[in-house]
Image (cartoon, rainbow, N blue to C red):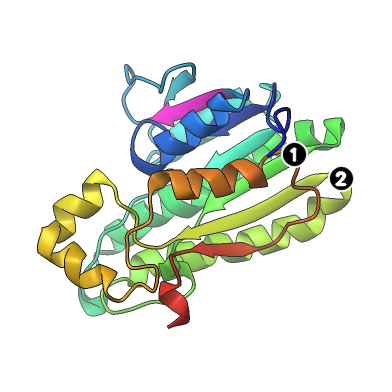
Amino acid sequence: MKEDALSDLKILVTGGTRGIGKAIAERLASGGARVDVTGTRPDGEAPEGCGYHGVDFSDRVAIDAFAQKIAEAGYDGLVNNAGVNKIGPFAEIDPADFDWIHQINVVAPFRLCQAVLPGMKARGFGRIVTLSSIWGHISKEFRASYSTSKFGVDGMTAALSAEVAEHGILANCVAPGFIDTELTRRVLGEDGIAELVQKVPARRLGKPQDVANLIAWLVSRENAYVTGQNILIDGGFTRT
């Protein structure tokens, strides 16, 4: 990537204090972007060189207030990374949990996209990336709530991209597979990971930096024509 592809772009990364979100924020900042992140704690810490906003995306009032706040902030890029998941048998899903997942995974990105679009249109430039998942391309048992939300942001992004590309705004989804984060290791354990990687053609978990590098290009000035896509980054898992 060219040295100036990210320089001075102002970019918001939601859920940017740990895991994939933190890697994204750090990668963008290292490329010269001016990066803000969100976290759930009012007094949370941003990655070095980034600004911080505390906001609870499970609260619709908080989402709307934050959307209003960022509408005038002049963001060139938005990375909707914050997300939650809860698995369980379809017939036993609590409607409150279903709503909670969609509030954070779908409603919040929708409202933030609405907030930044007018400024992006006025400047003739904007880049939006929303994190989907392999479970937004395929699905399996016990993931009805999460898959519904991730298929949903794919559809939202496809429609959005069709409306705004003529204004210089490109919108895409990125769909990670199994990524080597603290949460993944805690849930799967070493034996579970060893078994899993045998099903991944790349024979390893993805790294947060793998996802961050892809997103850095998508939100940069170098990306001039990729829009409306839901790009898998899964080591080939979903193609086998």
Quadrant of the frame with the N terminus:
top right
Q: Position of residue 97 (x, y in %)?
A: 28, 58
User: Please, what is the three-letter code of the amino acid marked with disc 1?
Assistant: Gly
Q: Position of residue 82 (x, y in %)?
A: 42, 43
Dot 1 lies on which element? strand
Q: Quadrant of residue 86?
A: bottom left
Q: Quadrant of residue 144?
A: bottom left
Name the residue that disc number 2 marks: 167
Q: Say few, some or many: other residues with alpha carbon within 10 Å of mark 1 (under 14 / 14 to 19 / 20 or more).
A: many
* Magenta stretch prevailing secondary structure: strand
User: Please, what is the three-letter code of the amino acid marked with disc 2?
Assistant: His
Q: Is residue 57 left or right of residue 80?
A: left
Q: Position of residue 109 (x, y in %)?
A: 54, 46
Magenta region: which residues? 35-39
Q: Is residue 31 above or below residue 81?
A: above
Residue 30 visible: yes
Discs 2, 1 touching: Cβ within 8 Å: yes
Q: CA distance from mark 2 to mark 1?
A: 8 Å
Disc marking residue 126: 1
Disc marking residue 229: none
Q: Is residue 73 above or below residue 169?
A: above
Tell me what residue is drawn at x 44 percent, y 43 percent. 209
Q: Position of residue 36 (x, y in %)?
A: 52, 24
Tell me what residue is drawn at x 76 percent, y 38 percent. 221
Q: Nearer the viewer, residue 78 or 199?
A: 199
Q: Nearer the viewer, residue 48 or 77?
A: 48
Q: Is residue 193 above or below residue 67?
A: below
